[in-house]
Image (cartoon, rainbow, N blue to C red):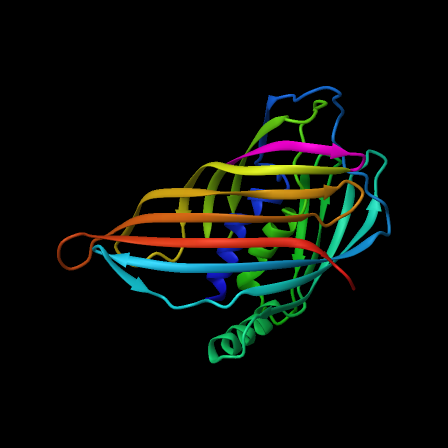
Amino acid sequence: MLRSFLLAGALSAALFSAAAPAQTTLQLLEPGAAPRQAIRYRFNAGHAEQAALDLNVQMAMSLAGQVLPLGAVPPIRMIMAMRTAEVAADGSARIEFELLSAEAAGDDAQAAQMNQALSESTRGLSGWYRVDARGQVSDSEVKAPDDGSASAVLQDLEQSMQQMAAPFPEEAVGPGARWRVTQHVTNSNMQMTQTAEYTLRSRAGNRIELDVKMVDASLDAVAGLPPGARLDSVKMEGGGTSSIQLDRLVPTGSVEANLQLGLSITAEGPTQSMGMNLKMKQAISPQAP
């Protein structure tokens, strides 16, 4: 169950606040209205914040047209500490982070089981990433305890922390500007290509308001499929909003996404169709220490 949450987080985070790893391409579609100006982060060395990330996932499965209920999944809240360790002359920054807590809501047995799994797999996780003034991430690392208990979630957390910024065009833009970001995501669960479209709704000083819409997605590889299973189709729809203070580390945003996978399973007997559906709601906001 924990792995499903982390997969869902990796799939949906880029919709509203995706940083740009090396495999990302950005295309400006519309420059927007005048006056136009470049959008750039303004990092400050020593600045520290905390982020609250809420993740709610609903999962369903169908086999040969019959829906198989998977039950309710408790929402998860993660609290991250973030700090700008250094700022280079070119405006890029090294951002350090630490996972302070991860808890599932509820007092039933399922929530208790989830909290036990979260405690064992995320305790002591920390790391860093380097990001330039346009939100381009050039390097990152996640550190885990020496006992290796968190090895299964390292890549997912690293991907999520890279996605705390938003990628901006090189050109000057104004209200109504649109740009398209194609991102190649690789982690322990999947290899995925996704394309999102950003719209600059408004700008007031250092604060910008963005709308984000998912326009395309494809899975190149998925780990953990049942024996004899083949991925036939992928459909992902979603969108959200993000409010970014350019001299801060944590945006305020929310996103909803719906991922539908179509599979064929060939075992002993005829081939059967199988469907998997993930409905995800994710929100991020600054958290008071």
| Viewer-proximal residue among 28 and 243 | 243
Give the farthest residue toward the top: 34
Asked if residue 276 lies in the magenta stretch, the reply is no
Q: Toward which corner of the image does residue 120 lie, by quadrant? A: bottom right
x 65%, y 36%: residue: 167
Quadrant where the N terminus is found in the figure? bottom left
| Viewer-proximal residue among 201 and 137 | 201
Residue 208 in sight from this viewpoint: yes
Quadrant where the C terminus is found in the figure? bottom right
**Depicted 154 relative to depicted 262: above or below:** below
x 65%, y 22%: residue: 32
Residue range of the region highlighted in magenta in the rendering = 195-206
Give the farthest residue toward the left: 269
Residue 18 in sight from this viewpoint: no
x 77%, y 61%: residue: 288
x 59%, y 28%: residue: 179
**Would you say 191 lies left or right of 19 here?**
left
